[in-house]
Image (tube, rainbow, N blue to C red):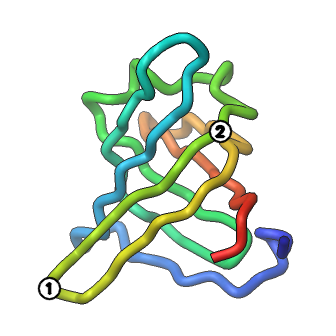
């Protein structure tokens, strides 16, 4: 698996509406939690996601290491994203919550 920091990234401008992505967090003994996010950047090794305001209460530092899936489909652009990974970092800066996911399985 490629290192997220060394692989080339595709960045999305925050001023424009970005790709919406469902982040599905695995939870032991409970139903998986689906969180709506916007894709900030993506590379072969991982992705960073901006969490929507209504889902901020479900994401915190204890989520680091949790198994996750990214699911997104856009019929207009024929874009499909289905990746598995782990939450690597949760960043809360300037009242914006960012989740960094490192991919564990090849595309």
Q: Residue 66 location, x and y as percent?
A: 67, 32
* Badge number at residue 40: none
**Residue at the outermost front position:** 29
Mark 2 Cα-neighbour bin, 10 Å: few <14, some 14–19, many ≥20: some
Tag 1 residue: 76
* In the depicted structure, whether residue 63 falls above or below residue 51: above
Whichever of labels 1 and 2 marks the residue nearer the N terminus, that label is 2
* In the depicted structure, whether residue 22 falls above or below residue 18: above
Frontmost residue, 97 versus 86: 86
Rendered residue at 40%/42% (across/down) = 51
Q: In which quadrant will I find the C terminus?
A: bottom right
Secondary structure state at the residue bearing disc 1: loop
Q: Residue 91 location, x and y as percent?
A: 61, 39
Rendered residue at 34%/64% (across/down) = 72
* In the depicted structure, whether residue 70 falls above or below residue 68: below
Rendered residue at 75%/58% (across/down) = 104
**Residue at the outermost left position:** 76
**Would residue 74 be found to the left or right of residue 71 on screen?**
left
Mark 1 Cα-neighbour bin, 10 Å: few <14, some 14–19, many ≥20: few
Q: In which image quadrant can residue 2 be found? A: bottom right
* In the depicted structure, whether residue 72 falls above or below residue 98: below
Rendered residue at 55%/39% (across/down) = 93
Tag 2 residue: 67
Q: In which image quadrant can residue 92 be found? A: top right
């Amino acid at each position: 698996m490629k290192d997220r920091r060394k692989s080339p990234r595709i960045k999305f401008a925050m001023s424009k509406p970005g790709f919406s992505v469902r982040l599905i967090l695995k939870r032991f003994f409970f139903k998986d939690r689906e969180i709506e996010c916007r894709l900030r950047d993506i590379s072969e090794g991982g992705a960073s996601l901006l969490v929507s305001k209504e889902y901020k209460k479900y994401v915190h530092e204890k989520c680091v290491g949790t198994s996750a899936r990214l699911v997104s489909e856009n019929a207009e652009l024929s874009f499909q994203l289905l990746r598995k990974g782990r939450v690597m970092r949760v960043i809360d800066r300037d009242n914006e919550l960012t989740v960094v996911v490192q991919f564990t399985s090849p595309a």
